[in-house]
Amino acid sequence: MSEPILEASNLSKNFNGFHAVNNVSLRIEQGTIHALIGANGAGKTTCFNLLSKFLAPSSGRIRLKGRDITRFRPDRVARLGLVRSFQLSAVFASLTALENVGLALQRRRGESFDFWRSTRKLDDNRARAEELLDAVGLADDHHTLAAELPYGRKRALELATTLGKDPEVMLLDEPTAGMATEDVGHITRLIREVARGRTVVMVEHNLGVVSELCDRITVLARGEILVEGDYDTVARDERVIESYIGGGGHA
Amino acid sequence: MQTALRLVAVLALAALLAVPLFPQIVYPVFVMQTLCFMLFACAFNLLLGHTGILSFGHAAFLGSGAYITGYCAKFLALPAELSILAGTLTGAALGAVFGALAIRRSGIYLAMITLAMSQLVYFFYLQAPFTGAEDGMQQIPRGTLFGLLDLHNDVTLYYVVFATIAGGLWVVWRTVNSPFGAVLRAIREHEPRAISLGYPVARYKVVVFTLSAGLSGLAGSMKAIIFQLAALNDVHWHTSGDVVLMTLLGGMNTVFGPAAGALLVSALTRYLDPFGAWVTVVIGVVFMACVLVFREGIVGKLQHVLRRRPREKRQAVDREGMVRTSE
């Protein structure tokens, strides 16, 4: 097997003695869409925060493109090409859609500390920002404030912003949470499109979305890996069925 | 709408430039003091309004600017421009230290850390041998600027102060409308998201802290030259509170709103002076009224009213658009 693009080995996280994530090892292959599923409290989000470095692991190692990132700060990991999204739509509310995406494009030009320059410097990014917004179906909302966008479109804007970083690995935290059915279909199609040529790790509750999108699925229960495999393997596994029905309760 | 605002701005500018010609109408020293507070408030708002950081220790920067400028001019006999530069840089350096320590926390804890550090600075100036303690540092020489402009001449002094403050305000405006300012807004709106886009947020916060403190130091330096005095008032926590008040009155989501707030507070303090202690009560009432009636501040409210019509139109369009794709 080739070198995985993102690899976690024996990852653990304690919160004052509570093992939120316990000895989890993951191999995320380049170009795949990988799902983390599990009942509430199974440790998916903690796992996610560990992978994106928003939390420091209690023990274990994380490697991105063969490089040990266990001690890196989250902003550095982002600059290395691993960009995450958030469970609740994370947009810059009082900025327009265009400005939101612009913030993802800005950094690359390496002049973001220049307080003596005009924002006109950033106009070069504008065409690219418009392109990204159009691609996620926000063609009519370039100048709408993010706060004024309906929820589904906020998620689309968030995705466009993430894409602005042109990430090699995208970590999507429940991209369809709290969405109406037709929006779920829209976002699912979008993710499939933008995942081309990238690697995606997603936490997702909606098993329909998981079955449609994901190549590989890891099921977590009480902080540990229960099963890993493709959708059919996982869906047939009795422990998974029990864990889902039992809500991750006492075994 | 925009033209109306521009007209007001031009008239205000003309009035400010004409001040030294009519000293019998308005006292130039009062105007200069107000200008200093305008810069102080706008600089403070780089943190509060534009980055979302509440500092409760900004008097330390204003006061340090005043004391260090006074010290350089009086005891080291440095020319005015170097004294002012020293005051400004001291403010900035102090800001870097405050920032580096305070940003480890956020919200009310950050405010408390800045307050604690500014109290340390206060007691330093109270005890230090060169400051004159409660009497303040008096008889600071104004000197000449670049060996050319004699600052003892009130008219020259006025225009030098005017130009310096205008320069300071320009830096504030430039910062807000720069790529750096865009990142600050991102941090204010959603800090974790800014991190996830690769911005080293802590470094941005320290830089904006330094900038804000440096400009506050500049305001203090000018104040020391104008009054030929650096006093404990400038470094007292009351002043840290006043600047919050000015900023909220004027509007923290605007660039120059805090300047309007500074003007209002400054004018009330001066023209209600005959009422003695009642000034505080009046300012308190004005503040409460402002917070209740227009939370976005005077200038914020004004902008809102002027922009209302186009925005309503746009929202109507959005509502139609919404039907197509969303819940």
Image: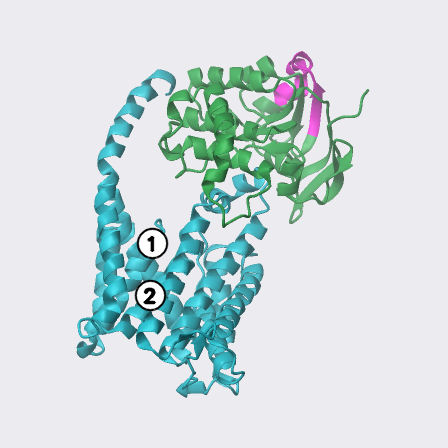
Q: Nearer the viewer, residue A103 or A121?
A: A121
Q: Nearer the viewer, residue B16 or A45?
A: B16
Question: Could one spot residue A211 in this view of the protein?
Answer: yes
Picture coordinates of residue A147 (x, y %)? 38, 34
Q: Earlier in the sequence, mark 1 or mark 2?
A: 2
Q: Is residue A42 left or right of residue B149?
A: right
- C-alpha span from label 1 to label 2: 12 Å
Please tell me in which quadrant of the rendered image residue A104 appears.
top right
Residue under label 1: B256
Q: Is residue A46 left or right of residue B288?
A: right
Q: Rate crowding at label 2 as few (under 14), some (14 to 19) or many (20 or more) other CA atoms within 10 Å.
A: many
Which chain letter goes with mark 2? B
Picture coordinates of residue A133 (x, y %)? 46, 24
Picture coordinates of residue B312 (x, y %)? 24, 32
**Residue at x-position 34% and y-position 62%:** B38
Please tell me in which quadrant of the rendered image residue A76 appears.
top right
Residue under label 2: B35
Chain depicted in green = A
Question: Hey, what amino acid is under mark 1?
Answer: Phe
**Residue A237 within the segment the image draws in magenta:** yes
Q: Rate crowding at label 1 as few (under 14), some (14 to 19) or many (20 or more) other CA atoms within 10 Å.
A: many
To the question of a shared chain for discs 1 and 2, the answer is: yes
Q: Nearer the viewer, residue B326 or B182?
A: B182
* Magenta segment main secondary structure: helix
Q: Is residue A140 left or right of residue A86?
A: left
Q: Which range of residues does the magenta coloring cover?
A: A225-242
Instruction: Look at the picture and state if B78 lies above or below A194.
Output: below
